[in-house]
Amino acid sequence: MREGQPHTIYLKDYTPPVYQVETLNLKFELGDEFTVVTSTAHYQRDPSHLGNTLLELDGEDLELISVQLDGRYLQVNQDYRLTPEGLQILTMPAQGSLEIVTRIYPQKNTALEGLYQSSGNFCTQCEAQGFRKITYYQDRPDVMTLFTTDIIAERAKYPVLLSNGNLVAAGELEEGKHWARWLDPYRKPAYLFALVAGHLKHVEDFYTTGSGRKVTLRIYTEPHNISKCEHAMQSLKRAMRWDEQRFGLEYDLDIYMIVAVDDFNMGAMENKGLNIFNSKLVFASPETATDQDYINIESVIGHEYFHNWTGNRITCRDWFQLSLKEGLTVFRDQEFTADLHSPAVKRIEDVRMLRTFQFTEDASPMAHPIRPASYMEINNFYTMTVYEKGAEVVRLYQTLLGRAGFRQGMDLYFARHDGQAVTTEDFLAAMADANQADLKQLQRWYDQAGTPEVKVTMTYDATAQTCRLHCVQSIPATPESQHKQPQLIPLQVGLLRETGADLALYLEDQPCDGILQLTQAEQSFRFTQVPEQPVPSLLRNFSAPVRLVYPYTEAELIFLMKHDSDAFNRWDAGQRLAMRAFESLLLDLKQGIPLGLSHECVCAWQVVLTDENLDPALRAEALSLPSETDIAEQLRPADPAAIHQVREFVLTTLAKALRLDFEIIFYRLQHQGVYQIDAASMGKRRLKNVCLAYLGHLDDQAVPALCAEQYAQANNMTDALAALAVLVDIDCPERVAALQHFHDRWQHDPLVMDKWFALQASSSLPNTLQQVQQLLEHPLFDMRNPNKVRALIGSFALRNPWHFHAADGSGYAFLAERVLWLNERNPQVAARMVRPLINWRHYESGRAQLMRGQLERIQAHQGLSADVYEIVSKSLA
Ligand code: ARG
Ligand code: ZN
């Protein structure tokens, strides 16, 4: 735990390491109470540093046993010094071998960073700075070396011993112990180190690379989960093939291992040759995993695999460059999913998430550029901004350069930087140089935070047959800067004729591909040869992560919903239509005017719902209206109770008006036979379950029975859970029975029970907070398991805005108390859980004060971790 205030680290202070490491040998003696780590590193001073003899090693929570330099024991205070940050070797020669022995306590490690235990097995999480909890070392990504790892443990308890690279030797020892030696032939930074030891089983498969090398693929799990790995294995093979086809990238070791663990702070980790995964992102069977789980697993398996090139072969110079690997790798996994399934559905889902959570973050006191200029705790910067906005910025290159140009840029990036630790400027330069393009202005996307707003107006001149789009961009002030420079924004547009067809575009009589490049604060584009007044379709396929403002009329939005050739914008027109409706309903509510939804609006959704030519998944997306969180974010200051009321009003109105259509479609799609996870089957289930959710808004006795029946008949988790999700919001005997049944059926399976906890936490029934509090005491709940915390507490705070924002502040007080509990045990998770409080300024004054009060309570707590301190203090600043 921290002493005093944590300090801020700045990008501008970066200096290259004075010493590089040629080789690193690690020896782990894994014990029941403690583990002894012996690390032997050969150091080489950078020749440009003549006089400097200080070698600074990072270390945290380590018990130092001994230090030897070239075989000689060093003396404390004479040869080395211990500091709060680590160990300083005072008289380090230009080269020398350091052997350091430390003792650590993995069994007591509740922060799940460094070496720890999950279900009695050893595993590691070193990114970003967990390696310093294993041994004293330069724990920074620009120090790369060749690792050899020896693991010694009791054979009976830990029959499987794994680390990065290839197994080169193994053997028996006395007292029932055994050992294994792993050698990783690729230089890597310490954050990519991994070790696993335990009682594990594996499934095995093979993959032959494009150049004909045979790679062994293994997924390790606890024995009882071994049957749930097939989907992950197939996903891995698809990812390997895809990366060869799309980017010409092959795997580079003889073995690729994935280990699933139940206790994990994040999703997964790309350790070289030995990925460690949250088991939630590995295990799947039709009875236990939803369609969304299947897709998530495939995408995260892909993500970690793609890191082998974008992250491992080329890594980050420092942690400010995190988006270099994460933004790029998220972009790659998005393209992977789009290529394998439906590109339009994938784009809609990604943008929905970006707008709900990243736009919110970008408007928060924690707003930061995708490449931050400073941080206190780097773990706080594994954010939607660095990942998802980072991916959108990578997408800008592809939009501007085309797929072929983007590929050339990637090829040059690998040709130049393989084996190096580099910066986002290096990536930009490779893209620009490979295409002889001037992309300098894109740099601002890396350095400026805040969601740009683009305001567009259109004027049509019938005599000249011209149409002018006037674009004004502005970027809101954020903590790192008040005044922003204009960014390069590719704005993809179309102009629709009255028939709904796209006009051929001419910019000043030159044929135009529809991508306008905004580079200035204010800019006009004149289209010529425009025979009639068009309706503009703007920001097609969400060509940049901006808020687009255009004074659309209701009629124009309905027109776009029907006709836009861009599937994304057809969907977005519906979202804008809904948002308009919410906005005016909120005003009516305030003024006591009875609520009503226009007939045209209702018909517009009916057209989408019943359009048999439209992909069912897209119909489902169109009918999924902006969430309460989205509305709160766009219509500030937010009153969560009013938002809940008007959104429920709209859902109920549509359910009543279109009841027959919902029923027809529901019954037609009801039974689908054998469970399949292709895009078409998933789309049908999705549409059916959206219909069911609407029917759930009818005050009708038949609904609970219908849900209970679907729940009982379902041969897959998607349908079972969808039915239960409707029931959970209705106070009826079917609800009680189904929840009990689910509990009894799945109590042995922690991942499925997470769904049970999450569902109840997101219920709209009045006593939900008491329910959540009772569930904290449930024998299967465990505050030390991050998945459980996210399922119960995370769902309540993020997916149940109405109850979380209860006017009496009870939701806030509950969250604050849980954050303080977690703060002492797992600071990373605590810092995630505090985030729903930080946008307090976006709420009406009563709630804002209550939220701020809880932040102040947390801030006043003694012994606050750096993680929580950073977020809370920035939120109150
Ligand atoms: N690099 C991992 C991934 O995105 C995430 C690891 C983050 N870990 C952390 N403790 N912040 O694939
Ligand atoms: Zn990643």
Image: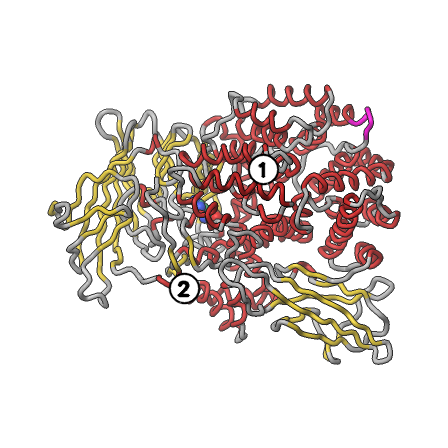
Q: Which residue is mark 2?
A: 417
Label ID, residue 797:
1
Q: Nearer the viewer, residue 811 or 647?
A: 811
Q: Which residues are magenta?
A: 699-703
Q: At 63% across and 31% down in the image, what residue appears?
A: 759
The residue located at (56%, 26%) in the rendering is 773
Quarter of the rendering containing residue 417? bottom left
Q: How many marks?
A: 2
The relative height of residue 684 versus residue 419 in the rendered view (above or below) is: above
Residue 267 in view (yes/no): no
Q: Pinpoint residue 282: horizontal percent, then vertical percent.
A: 52, 37
Whether the magenta-drawn stretch holds residue 634 is answered as no
The image quadrant of residue 661 is top right
Q: Is residue 836 visible?
A: yes
Spatial CA distance of label 2 from label 1 is 43 Å
Q: Nearer the viewer, residue 371 or 264?
A: 371
Crowding at dot 1, Cα within 10 Å, few <14 / some 14-19 / many 20+, comes out as many
